[in-house]
Each structure stands twice: as structure tokens, then as C-alpha cells.
Image: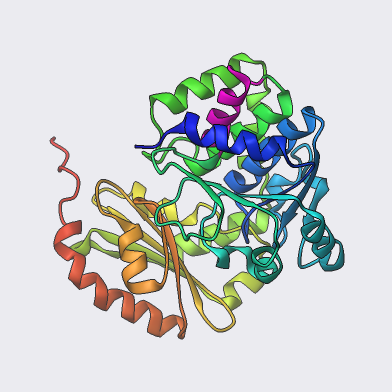
Amino acid sequence: MFDLVKYTKELSELLESSDNILLISHINPDGDAIGSQLALYHYLKSKGKAVSMLCPNNLQEFLKWMDGSEKINVFIRHRKRSLKVIEEAKLIIMVDFNQPGRLGEAEKAVTSSPAPKVIIDHHLEPHPFADLLISDPSMCSTAELVYEIISVLENGPFRNRSFLESVYVGIITDTGNFEHGSYTGRTMRIIADIIDSGIDKSRILNVVYNNFSADRMRLLGLALNQRMTVLSDYNTAYIYLTKQDLADFNHVKGDTEGFVNMPLSIKGINFSVLFVEKDNFVKLSFRSKGSFAVNQFASKYFSGGGHMNASGGEYYDTLDNTINYFIKVLEETRYQLKDELPDEKN
């Protein structure tokens, strides 16, 4: 059983003995990664700590408004400066990932650092490369776990506005604005506390979810109208996007965010997949409804993983071959997907 108080005490001891702390989020950071990173940043700065932040690659545009995001060192852009903050760190805290490969090009420098390392995360099957692992898969997001940790450290809620906004972004993005079933009553009580504190939730929702380009909307139209296939016999639908599709619509990082969720709104569809063609591989995103574990599917067939209803993977082959392989292995899970949800009654 996860003992939050025990792990928080161990973290507190590390924080008290460290005067230069580095916070790291994962490659291709999402709202939960950046939200968790910034939440910890604002808390630690309020305690007078020297804090630096690092991300392996660029933030998505819809996260760049967040207070403190401009202070994040992007490894692929600021390599010399990033290596310096890694070298100077006396404590390294990594958030929202549990595999060293998620450090991208920063992996070697981070893993070889003599500084004690902490992981704060909510994903399954962690790799043992940190000195302290604080992981609770029952949390809907790492941001929720960060909120709970800080509440223990403070013996109550921490009311800093930037901290609360960061946690809010982490929770809403990792739950798909509460469309995914990963949240609990505990999550909603945290959200209620954050909203009651006076954050401008309407502004945050607007900049996170209503801040895309016209090209992104046209790309979504192409995806749904010409690139979606429904496999009714498997209660499955998939969307594919080629490199040319992305180029035609001036794709920027984050533009395909949420596309994989769209087919799940079709009656009878319990499993949705997005294939995105890259230079020498295909990136896959998996979503499901009910008890079909896409993390197991991703791990078994596509070198991936994640959450039960939301995971990712990759396949090193052409787009056509990847789709054909997917359809082939889908047959093995056919009866798990069939009638996953009860039919609606007229």
C-alpha cells in the first residue's frame, strides 16, 4: 500500500539537506509534466531554495503562458547551460516519468550525475534508476500526487496561485478535462479546493483548449474525414496521418493532441488508435473505454506503455506495414474488445 506520509518524510529530508535542486520533466512534455514541474518550482522557491528546471525538448505552445515556463532550460536548445545545471545540482527531482529513456538526449548526463535522484510519478512499471521513488498509479496525474505531497509537507493546502494553476493544468490535461475515467472523488475535492482559492479557471481552460491554429482544425478535419477507419467487428477505430499530411497543414508540436480520443465518441467503439508517420518509425497513441488495458497492448506489441486507458508506443517500419501489423495483432484481442460496454437500450 502506498504510504504518502512515509515517502514525503523521506523527500523532506532530501529537500532540507539540498541547496541546489534541479527539476526535470520528460521528453515531449505534456500538461501534467510541465504542470507538476512548475508546481514544485513555485513551492520550493517559496521556501527559499535555489531551483533550476530542465526539459529534454521544446514545450508545446499551449503551455508557454504558464508562470515560470520561461525559466525551463530546454536541453536540445540550451545544451551547454543545461549540462551546467545538471552538473551543479545537489538533488535531482524527475516528474511524470519513470524510465531513463524519457530523458531524451539528456539521459547520459542526468543518470551519471552523483546527485541523489527522486522520481515523482503515477505510471506503472517504474525503472529503478532513482534513489527515491514516489509513485502512486491510483492518482489521475502526477500533478495530483504533487498536490498531495505538498499538502503533507505544509500540514494543509498550499495557497500559492502559481502553484495551484500549475496543478490545475496538470490534472485537467491528464484527465482530458475529465473525459477519462482516471479521476476520483479525491481528484474532484482537490479541484474544488483549487477553484475555491480563486484561480481564473475560465481563462486557463481557454488558453489550454481554445488556442489552436486554423491549420490544426483543418488537419483534424482531414483526419476524421479521410484518415479514419472504423473496424466494427473489433469495436475499434484508427486514424493515420502521413508526414505529408503534417507538412501540408504546417504542423507544430501539439497539433495532434486529442485526435486519438475522437473515435471513442462513436457508438460501439471501445478502442481508438492514432498512427503518426515519423522519419524512420511510426508513433502510436492508444485510448480505450472500459476495462480493455491499452498499456498491456502497447507493451506487448509496440514497445510502449502508460495507463490502462491511455498509452503510447512506436513501431520501426513503414506506415502501411505498421497499420497492417496492428490489424493482425488486433485479432488476438478481438474478444476482449467485443461488447466491452453494454449496448444502449431503446
Q: Quadrant of residue 219?
A: bottom right
Q: Is residue 104 left or right of residue 324?
A: right
Q: Main secondary structure of the magenta part?
A: helix
**Residue 12, image x, y percentages:** 63, 33
Q: Nearer the viewer, residue 14 or 84?
A: 14
**Residue 140, image x, y percentages:** 45, 39
**What residue do we see at 33% from left, 81% from top?**
324
**What residue do we see at 66% from left, 46% from top?**
34
**Residue 307, image x, y percentages:** 39, 52
**What residue do we see at 70% from left, 40% from top?**
38
**Residue 11, image x, y percentages:** 60, 38
Q: Nearer the viewer, residue 159 or 177?
A: 159
Start-end of magenta stretch? 143-158
Q: Is residue 324 magenta?
A: no
Against 301, residue 317 (above or below) is below
Residue 109 in sight from this viewpoint: yes
